[in-house]
Amino acid sequence: MSEAARSLLQRWGASFRRGTDFDSWGQLVEAIDEYQILARHLQKEAQSQHNNSEFTEDQKSTQSQEEFKLEDLKKLEPILKNILTYNKEFPFDVQPVPLRKILAPGEEENLEFEEDDDEGGAGAGSPDSFPARVPGATEGTLLPRLPSEPGMTLLTIKIEKIGLKDAGQCIDPYITVSVKDLNGIDLTPVQDTPVASRKEDTYVHFNVDIEIQKHVEKLTKGAAIFFEFKHYKPKKRFTSTKCFAFMEMDEIKHGAIVIELYKKPTDFKRKKLQLLTKKPLYLHLHQTLHKE
């Protein structure tokens, strides 16, 4: 199997698994987002000129039935899994590809993880670009700005950079942004940034805009915007949360802001917070308020 074909199948499989996982957990908004991402990938591939000769006209059709049951969708999982399994009999030689694991919400809290040494650790890395270890992982899942409404305020948050003592050693880092109420329940769809483009000294640079998916006036009292910094651990083969930060409603104001970093696991209820380090390292943001 060519590298391009393997990458394509992995990308489809990752979106499919995330969608069915969210569906199983009852997180329908997130599940729909993942299914739509998968649908766009499939549609793009079917309509690409490069593959026109490999598809029949029926196969290239992008029309589909209105609804699929979760049970029906899960029937596709073993098919995708078999394609990516090493098997010389199928009908071509598929070399094994290590797949990383992205943990379900709360799952990481049950794992044993090494505590980061706040004062020690490796030195910072030199300016560099991050390798894309998982096909499709670099794009993120960012959403466009909502339509404006008279008298209502929309919030754009630019994630500029995050300060970490071992910034140079983080593999495929990205930030998951979510808006939670006091009970840790999602108020908007969760968004992932693309993988960071640059690391320099003690900083990982993102420079990416996040469009908060609800008007500020419609956010419930006590809500907070969370930023979870995640990176890939090759020895354990899963993506882990390294630290998190959050911004409360009274901190929403136009301009630059820096917020403190806290140790994992992410405490969405904000009950047992512990700073990541005593060093002056923060998440650097810039807020823009849009009001019609």
Image (cartoon, rainbow, N blue to C red):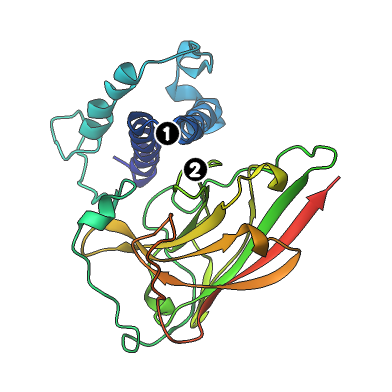
Count all numbered tags in the image, as a single digit: 2
* Residue depicted at 69% across the width and 54% down the height: 156
In this view of the protein, which residue sits in the foreground, 237 or 261? Answer: 261
The residue at which mark 1 appears reads as: 27
Coordinates of residue 9 in the picture (x, y in percent): 35, 37
Q: Position of residue 258 (x, y in %)?
A: 61, 74
Horizontal side, residue 237 vs residue 154: left or right: left
Label 2 sits on residue:
186
Do callouts 1 and 2 mark residues in contact (Cβ within 8 Å)? Answer: yes
Position of 247 compared to 241: left or right? right
Mark 1 element type: loop
Of tags 1 and 2, which is closer to the observer?
2
* Residue 182 location (% of width, % of height): 49, 50
Name above or below for residue 217 compared with residue 284: above
- What amino acid is found at the position of numbered circle 2 in the picture? Asp
Find residue 276 and report its horizontal and vertical position in percent.
40, 76
Say which element carries label 2.
loop
- Residue 100 can be seen in this image: no
